[in-house]
Image (spheres, rainbow, N blue to C red):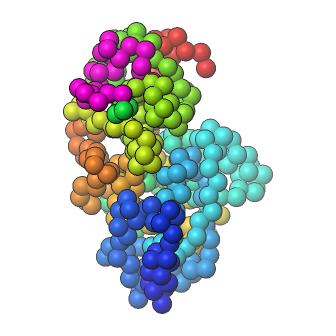
Amino acid sequence: MAAAVLLVTACGSPANSKTAQAERLLPRAAVDTSDGLRIDGELVADRALYEAARGQRATLYSAAGKEAEDLTLARFTAETGIAVELTRLPNNKLAERALSEHGAGKLGADVIRLTDPRTARKFTDAGVYVPYETPFRAQLKQSSPNWFAAYYFVNAMAYNAAIHTENPPDGWEDLVDPRYRGELGVVAITTGGTLNALTRFQLDTFGPEFLDRMAAQRPRVFNSTSTEVEALARGEISIATVSVNNAFGAETGGAPIRLVIPKEGVSASEGPLGVTPRGAQNPAAQVFMNWSASKAGQRFVGSQGFVPVRTDIGTVRTGDYELPTADSPRFHLLTEDGFARHAKADETLWKQKFGFIG
């Protein structure tokens, strides 16, 4: 009966609904509810957990982009029948709210997704994140019992295809090519962990002088990825370092943007997902955690322009693009330990190179 309800819901969705948009990105997985919840052949929730979760609702606080989160939650609900309420805030503001609510004993979230592993460490120390183990722990690169990376945020580059119709940029070195002087867009390193990862990748791969050469391009510096991608789509800049998910979302929405996945690879950072004390008692939140680590959940985030953490699911294409897998030498991950070692010094250096105050 549950499987039938899920099927009717999906088939009856309007063409512009989030459920339908998610289906266009990646066809839904096979769902079997005859003995618990089995998706793509994996047992996401046993009978007892699934029966307890049905009819319940989970609350997610997320620092990830709203468009991506809306699509992810639509897919989760389509495959499980469980609803999730979303509160979306930038990582720093989300951290302030969650820590404040937790301190007052009124934390409203069951599950929290972050964009910076340094905040995940704070949440662990404060008890905002509590231990939870999905059935797929062995397939995850999970370093903490209190949270796991549900996917990796990835930064690459993109250009405006309406402007660069011939001989378009195709690699990181184009960012410092004089022909793009005055046309480059970058996001400030102070914006969040994904930009720390990008800067560390650039320093490790090309050396500090690469930042000097980028600064010499007289780039426009943005305080958010979304405003940068909007400026790229409008032609206010013509080339940029970008979050792959954001740029891909704009491209699928009709913007004249083309991504470039350079031969040297991409920078990446962890997207922590953890359960709160309240969520540990909520079966719906537990199913969401399990689904996020499942093949179905991992394949879907891969279709949106994130890199799946699991490497046992095969290649997942993001539209026309193929991102490096997490075990590829072209995948350059800045881990939590890497943040601890490099983030502060890299931020100081970046501000100095770009003359940035903020």
Image: magenta residue range: 163-190
Where's the C terminus, which quadrant?
A: top right
Task: Say which residue appears at 56% left-offset and 77% top-offset.
Answer: 53
Q: Position of residue 154 (x, y in %)?
A: 38, 40
Q: Is residue 321 above or below residue 75?
A: above
Task: Say which residue appears at 53% left-offset and 26% top-offset.
Answer: 222
Q: Position of residue 306 (x, y in %)?
A: 38, 48
Near-viewer residue (234 or 328): 234
Can residue 332 be seen in the rendering of this structure? no
Q: Position of residue 14 (x, y in %)?
A: 51, 69
Near-viewer residue (236 or 355): 236
Task: Say which residue appears at 28% left-offset and 49% top-offset.
Answer: 320
Left or right, residue 3 beside residue 208: right
Task: Say which residue appears at 73% left-offset and 51% top-offset.
Answer: 101
Q: Is residue 264 above or below residue 253?
A: above
Left or right, residue 320 beside residue 56: left
Query: Is 219 covered by the magenta stretch?
Result: no
Query: Is 165 covered by the magenta stretch?
Result: yes
Q: Position of residue 92 (x, y in %)?
A: 62, 38
Q: Is residue 183 above or below residue 18?
A: above
Near-viewer residue (245 or 166): 166
Can residue 9 be seen in the rendering of this structure? yes
**Residue 250 found in image quarter:** top left
